[in-house]
Image (cartoon, rainbow, N blue to C red):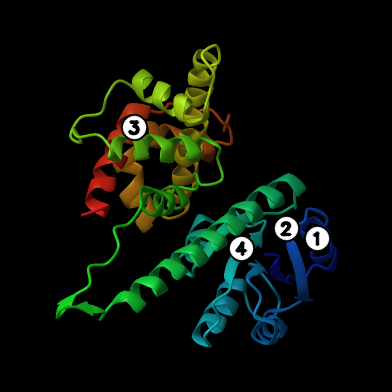
Amino acid sequence: MALSFCIVDDDRSARRMLQHIIEDSGLGEVAGTAEGGQEGVRLILEESPDIVLMDLLMPDQDGIETIRSLQAQGCKSKFVMISQIENQDMVGRAYESGIEFFIRKPINRIEVQTVLRKVNERYAMSLYLDEIKSSLKKLEGLRFGGVPAAPPRRTVKEIVQPILMNMGMIGESGSRDIIAIMEILSEREDTGNLPPLKELYEAVAAGYKAGPGEIAKEIKAIEQRLRRALATGLTHLASIGLTDYSHPKFEYYAPLYFDFEDVRVKMKEIEQGRESGKAKVNIRKFLQVMQLELQEGRL
């Protein structure tokens, strides 16, 4: 499904560049552009795009005002904020208004593509979850012999995917391995203990139909994918914490799934502009916490 975009930015060259990146990368179609907040409101209400790229600072009204005006009028679009501003309070206000991500100017093609792919994934996931909720509502009230029908048990994937999405990890290849591990753990009788990681990796590799001579190589690849995925999640949460320390996602996921000292180190790296992309992560702790959340989610 091709998503529709609207771009609101008072810089004409920025609008053109963003449109080219979106359409050339096959991310979706640009339904329209506007150079100011008020014009943007009219455009967005008329076009009802899936995703809006909104400049933070514009002559007539800033992006935060524009987003709140749209939301008050029932707009359901997802918002990505664009700006070169470094004021953390302003960035925090932008997240509070309901934006998904922040793209910094000057515009970088790789950054835009990466961010918008993640937004697309979140949008697709939200549609998927909405369909599930709709199906569950239809089942409510059905009765068999006077007894309300029990709602269908949620699958491992339905529980785990939103968690990975909230931590910004759903686009990583390691997310597939995490789901596979949780599916294996959900079938074990001893649900209280996490087996050795190597045992889990072997089970996942076998599930991927890796041949006898490929198991060892696949086990190593699984661990590397997991480390990259967790590093991405840690970086994502640390970035949120820098802009808004009280953000619900940061408050919940950062200390629960990661060692908070590692989160603080990553926040300091990002703040000082020496982010290397590497991060210290504890795979076993991460999987243990997710195993507990999976058990609670399936009750």
- Residue 61, compared with residue 187, is above or below; it is below
Name which residue type carries label 1.
Answer: Glu
> Element under label 1?
helix
Query: Where, by quadrant of the figure, is residue 54 drawn?
Result: bottom right
Give x and y (percent) for residue 143.
21, 79
Camera-nearest label, 4 or 2: 2
109 left or right, relative to 134: right
Residue 27, labelled with which disc?
2
Instruction: Confirm or deny contact between disc 2 and disc 1 (CB under 8 A).
Output: yes
Mark toward the start of the polypeptide (4 vs 2): 2
Give x and y (percent) for residue 173.
55, 37
- Residue 81, compared with residue 257, is above or below; it is below
> Element under label 4?
strand
Name which residue type carries label 3.
Answer: Glu
Camera-nearest label, 3 or 1: 1
Q: Residue at x 36, y 25 (%)?
A: 200
Mark toward the start of the polypeptide (4 vs 1): 1
Find disc 1 in the rendering and name its residue: 23
- Residue 197, compared with residue 167, is above or below; it is above
Name which residue type carries label 2.
Answer: Leu
Residue 143, labelled with which disc?
none
> Element under label 2?
loop
